[in-house]
Amino acid sequence: MNLHKTLTFAHEMHAGVNDWTGVPYITHPVFVMLSLPASCSEEDKHIALLHDVVEDCKDRLIEKFDLEQPHHQDQIPKEWQDKENQLLLEKIFSAFEKYGYSPYIIEGLRLLTRDCWDGLTYLEYVKNIIESNHEGAMWVKYCDNKHNNSIERRAKLPEQLLEKSTQMAKRYDKSIALLEEALTTCIVKRTNGLG
């Protein structure tokens, strides 16, 4: 899969959607991709471009991959909703494989998709990414948090989102610190020929 096709695909999935600052949403995954260090692989760039697609674009993915629509969530018991959501996620990841994405990319997307990790707090979810040792997922989450937490981006938020943004900033600061520590360890191990 080439990067241009992934960019086109991500753009199609996020088409017509703006982020909280009012700019087209696709600018966020592109910024995340461009923020990755030079040591990251092309596969990591695919993960960056697609990191919010599964979580935010399920309806479009169902249509794109011609998947069976899930039942109306309000018409089935909660435990069935959870199972149905997990089945849908597996179908989506299988479709990514058929679309030509590598197991490494799919695993990165699975790790970054919050819906796969119901029941975890945000920091537990980030720790799960770290414990996976999937360096690409760690770099994407790090760059994602840095962009979401940037002062320049937060300054463009509408007033009604400023309080929530302040709360989110604390969460992102903790996440960034955890990811920096883990990524530094990865770099040191690699530099010393241990990883």
Image: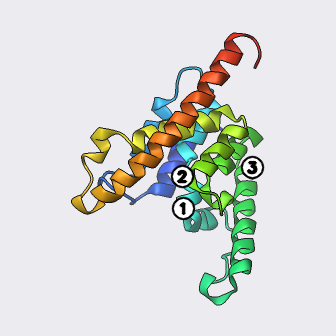
Q: Secondary structure at mark 1?
A: loop
Q: Are the residues tagged 1 and 2 within 8 Å (C-beta)?
A: yes
Indicate whether 103 appears above or below 118.
Answer: above
Q: Which residue is mark 1?
A: 57
Picture residue at 60% right of the left edge, 62% below the top: 61
Given the current orientation, which residue lies at the most extreme bottom position?
Answer: 75
Task: Return the disc, 1 or 2, that comes first in the chain's sequence.
Answer: 2
The numbered mark, 1 or 3, whose residue comes first in the sequence reads 1
Q: Disc 2 vs disc 3: which is toward the camera?
A: 2
Q: Nearer the viewer, mark 1 or mark 2?
A: 2
Q: Amino acid at mark 2?
A: Asp
- Percent of width and height locating residue 115: 63, 61
User: Can residue 144 be spotted in the picture?
Assistant: no
Residue drawn at (52%, 60%), measured in percent from left and top? 56
Residue neighbourhood size for the residue with mark 3, other residues' Cα within 10 Å, grouped as few (<14), some (14–19), many (≥20): some
Q: Which residue is mark 3?
A: 97
| Spatial CA span between label 1 and label 2 | 8 Å
Label 2 belongs to which residue? 52
Q: Residue at x 72, y 55 (%)?
A: 93
Asked if residue 87 shows in the view, the reply is: yes
From the viewer's perspective, is residue 13 above or below residue 28? Answer: below
Location of residue 1 in the rendering, given as x and y in whole percent from the top left corner:
66, 38
| Secondary structure at numbered mark 2 | loop
Count neighbours of disc 1 (C-alpha within 10 A) and say few if under 14, some if 14 to 19, many if 20 or more: some
Q: Amino acid at mark 1?
A: Cys
- Horizontal side of 184 relative to 161 (left or right) equals right
**Cα gap from disc 2 to disc 3, whole angstroms:** 17 Å
Name the quadrant of the C terminus.
top right
The three-letter code of the residue at mark 3 reads Glu
